[in-house]
Image: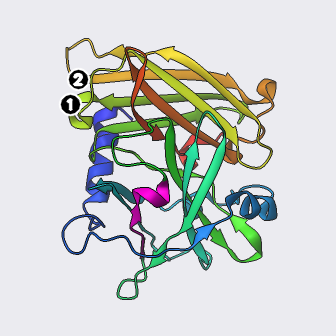
Amino acid sequence: MNRSALVGLAMVALAAVSCGGDGGDNSPVEVAPVDVPELLARAGHSWADDISASTPGIRELVCKDDVWFPEIYSDPLGRPRIERMVFVAWDMPAGTFRGWDLVQNAADRHTWSAALSAEEVGFGCDERFTTGFFFLTSWPENNVSVPVGFQRAERGAFSDAIRSDDGVLVEHSTWIDSDMANVPGPDKATFYLQNLFTGATFSTDVPTERDLDGSPDYYAALEVDYGELGLGAMTDVVAGVAYKSDGAEVMNQCLTVLATSLP
């Protein structure tokens, strides 16, 4: 599927969700912090028996006035009973996680959200582009989903893909529309990969390529052998990319393994 189709699908899906930061009271609400390493240690691996059931695809992250608003819509049909959804801030170079429980909306049980201050998260809207965001869904018996990535920019500013024919040699590719993301055109992308459960990590810089038609679209790709790097199962790995311009990080996104990604 090409980039425009991916963006179109994402925008149609997100249109069904009301953004947690649009209008209304923008004050942070008290949410419970989560010991993410402890949660992962109890699970031991991701619940990947049915990725389409474990990765709710309609989600949005907005930051306004240094308050972070993650929101997720989860269709419960055909899914196991969800116990909790955890919003995770991942310091990609350090390989550390901080998390918070999202709150289920009492009026719409499909929606989970939170409002977190810059003090809680540790930084404001336009800072720390080496920290990416994703969420984990948890079910009874300590099952957790594959990590599902958030994007730190306007809807439709990104698209991404993770592909593999054998679950070992894995291709990661990302696109960013620099105009929609409101950033200078990136000349480099740093990919970060980390196994959630073993802590194994890998990172590398790759140059970006700009679309030949002169559009503000920039592309970066990375193919790596998870077996050779000791990263383990691709469904246990969180992947992120930090875009750089003249050596400075200007934006990031976390990628997501989907059912169509698997061999």
Using the numbered discs, state the Cα–Cα distance from disc 1 to disc 2 in whole angstroms. Answer: 6 Å
Q: Which dot marks residue 106?
A: none
Q: Which dot marks residue 179?
A: 1
Is residue 185 in view from this perspective?
A: yes
Q: Which of 39 and 255 is in front in this view?
A: 39
- Quarter of the figure that contains the N terminus: top left
Mark 2 = which residue?
216
Name the spot of residue 257 as percent of width and height, x first.
Answer: 57, 45
Relative to 172, say whether 145 is above or below.
Answer: below
In the displayed structure image, the side of residue 112 where residue 234 appears, left or right: right
Q: What residue type is labelled 1?
A: Asp
Q: What residue type is labelled 2?
A: Pro
Mark positioned earlier in the residue sequence (1 or 2):
1
Badge 1: residue crowd in 10 Å (few <14, some 14–19, many ≥20): some
Give the magenta-colored segment's residue range: 111-121
Residue 175 figure quarter:
top left
Badge 2: residue crowd in 10 Å (few <14, some 14–19, many ≥20): some
